[in-house]
Amino acid sequence: MRFLHTSDWHIGKSLKGRSRLEDQEAVLRELVGVARAHEVDAVLVAGDVYDSAAPSAEAQRLAVQTLLGFRSTGAEVIVIAGNHDHPRSFEAYRPLMQAAGITMVGTVRRADRGGVVEFQARGSGEPVRVALLPFVSQRFAVRAAELVTQTPAENAAKYDQMVRDLLTALSAGFDDDAVNLVLAHLTVTGGRFGGGERLAQSIFDYYVPATAFPADAHYVALGHLHRRQTLPAPCPVEYCGSPLAVDFGEEDYTPVVRVVEAAPGSPARGVDIPVTAGRRLRTVRGTVAELAERAAEHGDAYLRVWVREPARAGLREQVQEVLPNALEVRIDPEFAAAATGDRPTRPTAGRGPGDLFREYLASQNVADERVEAMFDLLHDEIVGAERHG
């Protein structure tokens, strides 16, 4: 059988105040096209459908349209909640989604109560079993009293054991004559972060080793870490990564979606299909003149700009005039350090406020005569008011 593995859509995510909904819609439309072109038997969505537990109506509309689009290809569609999603909302949607032929699970369930989905691959007729493990919070695994009385190591071990017990129970019905899959949203030890994850729910007590997964699973489809990566384990343990970079920390890799083939008695084999839709993110450096000269190179990418000039009033506006897609404008840290690192400290005795303020501006790598003039004007007004008060 053949299935598509995707996760971490983060619908509704904005970047530096700029909505990415248009990009997200283009990316998800491309994913539906991949599922249709490859005639997959199932689509597995490994959590973080939304970026917020309270998504906007527009974000919910896009998620529903996408899931229905996957279903219209004839594939089984299975989606679990991630740490950004609201698990109870997923459960509220569950009956409606079931009526559309879509399985949506927000909370941990027993195998016989929706924790395992069984179906037959439409092409080959092979039986398929999918064990579902939505995001498990620390509060679920460790009670409040234990958080206070036990050490972090003890709490981490308890979380690890809880996840192992859940996986053991959910995979108890795996069969040698079936394709056995695990769909989960969690952090695996040794996984590399992409840059946009919610770290408080990714580190400390929120991880398990890859050995926690059942060795007889044909494939473990993971969500949560945004980089595409494979973890060493007795069975294939894979993060597909986010199909759209959600932060500038994720700009240096190509997002993908995975199409995987699996059959009873043989290892799963997958291919990464690059996702081309959606604006890319880039970090650019230079003086304003250099940035203007190379502006055409960046296309429609959203930009983080590190300026190699002293700070001054209006600098951000100058940069955005030549680079309209600049979402963040800062002084290049390397330039600032080089400009201020060796400046000697001068004694302050006998020097006026204006001199001290100009030295402060120089120490901050700010060169703007208008700021100095404004300081002089305000200083004169204050001193004059005190004299006449």
Image (spheres, rainbow, N blue to C red):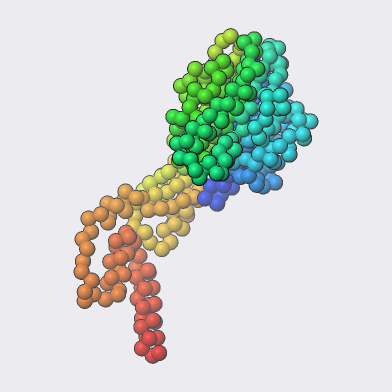
Residue at the extreme right of the image, as rendered = 99
Write the residue at 59% across / 22% down: 168
* Viewer-closest of 215 and 56: 215
> Visible in this render: residue 35?
no
Residue 146 rendering spot, x and y as whole percentages = 53, 41
Residue 386 image-quadrant placement? bottom left
Write the residue at 21% across / 61% down: 344
* Viewer-closest of 154 and 262: 154
Left or right placement of residue 36 versus residue 200 in this view:
right
Q: Quadrant location of the C terminus?
A: bottom left
Q: Quadrant location of the N terminus?
A: top right
Residue 48 image-quadrant placement? top right
Left or right placement of residue 51 versus residue 280 in this view:
right
Residue 176 image-quadrant placement? top right
Q: Where 325 sits versus 94, above or below?
A: below
> Visible in this render: residue 213?
yes
